[in-house]
Amino acid sequence: MSDLYHGSGKREQKIKRLSRGGPGGRWVRGPTTIDTLPDDVLLEILDLYRLNPTTTTHWDLHWKWHTFAHVCHKWRRVIFASPRRLDLQLICKPGTPVRRNLDCWPALPVVIDFRGSTSSGFLRRVLGSDEDNIVAALEHPGRVRGIYLDVTTSLLQKMDAVMQGPFMALTSLLLSSKDRIVPVLSDEFLGGFAPSLLHLSLKGISFPALPKLLLSTSALSSLRLESLPITGYISPEVTVACLSALPNLKTFSIKFLSPTRPNQRSRRLPPRTRVVLPALTKFSFRGVSQYLEDLAVRIDAPLLCQLEITFFNQLIFDIPQLTQFVNRTDRLRSLSRACVYFWFRGLGVSTLIRPMDKGIERWISWLILCKPIDWQVSSMAQIFQQSPPLHSNIEELIFAANRTPPGWQGDIDVIEWLDLFHPFSAVERLHVADELGPQIARSLEEGSRDPMMEMFPELRTLNFGSPSESTSVEQFITTRELSDNPVIVSYSSKSWTQWFKFD
């Protein structure tokens, strides 16, 4: 029984206290062995064990109640007498003989779970030998509680055929596909009705009737639509209409597979009143800025504290509505620490903005998908120049990059760096990683020669990774001293991740 006592201190104390006492809090004289525990005490111990996060592993996400059910007849009786409290489920995993054994097992909820882990979100690919077992489980619509699958087009067609009616017990549906030919769910999928659904994730799958289904999912807590193909396009207006029917939605993600712009002819003027999403705390987007603009002008999310944005490359980023949306969201204002990270020969340029202290986990994340480094600098400059709420409170700024290629400095004109510097008028501490040191130093030196150029007017500390001639900023320092606004230059071997930790 040592495993039953493994967990947090409070749980251990409660288990030990219960194991010494009988029903109604009566104390039992002398030592108590596990076989003499009253049923209610044993049930409490098993329930606490189930709730202990150490009872599941990274690769096995469900607690093994069946192990305890085989200990003895008493344990089996106690366990099966409380299936809801102990959250008893039958797990259909790779290799589970559902077709052969389901009728022999207790009539418990079924979870079809091919996840590799919760943290990575990885879904194991379904092998042909498992397809029939999955279909066999789906033939019991009243019992299926969760579905987590990476599907082929052929498997999705088989599933669709047996899922034409409501699955009233279904609370979680996560389907993904990597097929080149995008699989499509029919309009009759789930009978267009899923009132118990709490979590819905579709990745690389087209579902034209999704807006209709969402009208029945008022309890939905998380909605993830990712790698959306062109055939699965949903207009901003329809998206907002769907969101308005989801008052309990906490997490929303909409990510397009390729740049897809709203149809200019079908675009409507925004309504006079915005849709309020009262529970939304995290919003993730990937697409073109015009689509996000059409969303931002139509919604308010008063509790939003995590905003993740990925833009495909564009020549012009016009985001006035997004700026106003952020300004209307209290938890996204007053973020005071930012890191701008350049991915040479990689994804693009990213920025993470967060508060100085811990508290509620609040942040805004940007990623612009463009490879040329000069485009990365100018794109991020555009974003910040248009968005005072994003930078007006930033007191600490970090510039970092991955490994830089030889001769890259010649790809960027100084004026592009200065355009990026200009919006950060409140920055007091600036940290520059070694990879960017020479280029940032040269830009500061050049900018200081222009009396009309104002760079980091509140700056007090400038930190470079290591001292060298290429990071000399004598002209900049002299200019600041003459203006009675001195800056201290220091050097530190800290990585940008160390600088970005909470104080």
Image (spheres, rainbow, N blue to C red):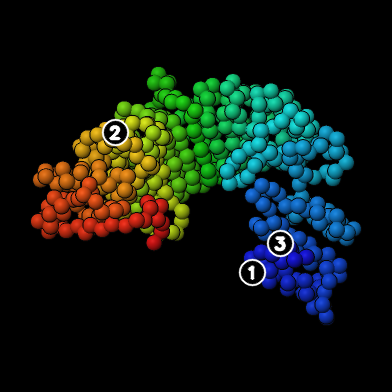
Q: Depth check: give the residue in front, 501 or 491.
A: 491
Q: Please give the label number shown on residue 9.
A: 1
Task: Identify the residue under disc 2.
Answer: 374
Question: Which dot, 1 or 2, sits closer to the camera?
Answer: 2
Direction right: furthest residue: 73
Mark 1 / mark 2, whichever is N-terminal: 1
Q: Amino acid at mark 2?
A: Asp
Give how far across and how far down residue 187 sits, in percent: 64, 23
* Residue beneath the point at 20% across and 43% down: 443
* Residue beneath the point at 88% across and 59% down: 72
Task: Identify the residue under disc 3.
Answer: 48
**Whether residue 43 can be seen here:** yes
* Residue beneath the point at 34% across and 46% down: 400
Q: Residues within 10 Å of mark 1 (few under 14, many from 20)?
A: few
Direction top: furthest residue: 265
- Gap in Å between the C-alphas at discs 2 and 3? 56 Å
SS at mark 3?
A: helix
- Gap in Å between the C-alphas at discs 3 and 1? 12 Å
Q: Amino acid at mark 3?
A: Leu
